[in-house]
Amino acid sequence: MVISRRDAALALDISMEMAQRHGIPSRLSEADLRELQDNPPAWLVQSRSNRTGKRPVWVHLTCAVCGYSEAVRPKKWWPDFSFVFCGHHRNNELPELFLGDVRTEYEGVGSRFVGVVDVREDQA
């Protein structure tokens, strides 16, 4: 089976830019990916040792309403979302806001999501 460079980057936990820079082809076999995972080249070993774990390379976003999911690179401005939803859903489809909570929405998350942060009113 053949996988894309993006899927390889996800599996290796590296950015698309790094995958391109180090010559990972636009399509590669699962055997080639396994070889990279089992015998990582020096640049991949170095990249993994430099990781601090503060920010993930990829995150999986899943709509709280319909379950649509995608893997994206997180942005520095993203807070810790309570949940995300597809931008086309109506407000009455969203999970209810608890009494005493305040909701803030952030548009432009991933390709189609709105991120939501619910906090206690006294923390807002």
Image (cartoon, rainbow, N blue to C red):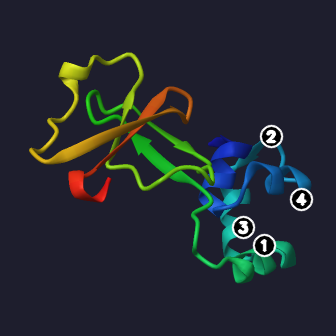
Residue at 77% from the left image edge and 74% from the top image edge: 47
> Which residue type carries mark 3?
Glu
Q: Nearer the viewer, residue 103 or 80?
A: 103
Name above or below for residue 112 compared with residue 122. Answer: above
- The residue beneath circle 3 is 35
Task: Give the CA separation, mark 4 to mark 2.
Answer: 12 Å
Of badges 4 and 2, the one in the foreground is 4
Name above or below for residue 60 compared with residue 18. Answer: above
Whether residues under marks 3 and 2 lie with C-beta atoms below 8 angstroms apart, the answer is no
- The residue beneath circle 4 is 22
Whether residues under marks 3 and 1 lie with C-beta atoms below 8 angstroms apart, the answer is no
Name above or below for residue 81 compared with residue 84. Answer: below
Quarter of the image that includes the N terminus: top right
Task: Give the CA separation, mark 3 to mark 2.
Answer: 16 Å
Task: Check disc 4 and report its element: helix, strand or loop.
Answer: loop
Task: Give the CA separation, mark 3 to mark 1.
Answer: 12 Å
Residue at 73% from the left image edge and 45% from the top image edge: 5
Whether residues under marks 1 and 2 lie with C-beta atoms below 8 angstroms apart, the answer is no
- The residue beneath circle 2 is 26
Residue at 62% from the left image edge and 49% from the top image edge: 75
Whether residues under marks 4 and 1 lie with C-beta atoms below 8 angstroms apart, the answer is yes
**Which image quadrant is residue 3 in?**
top right
Describe residue 47's horizontal placement relative to residue 109 as left or right: right
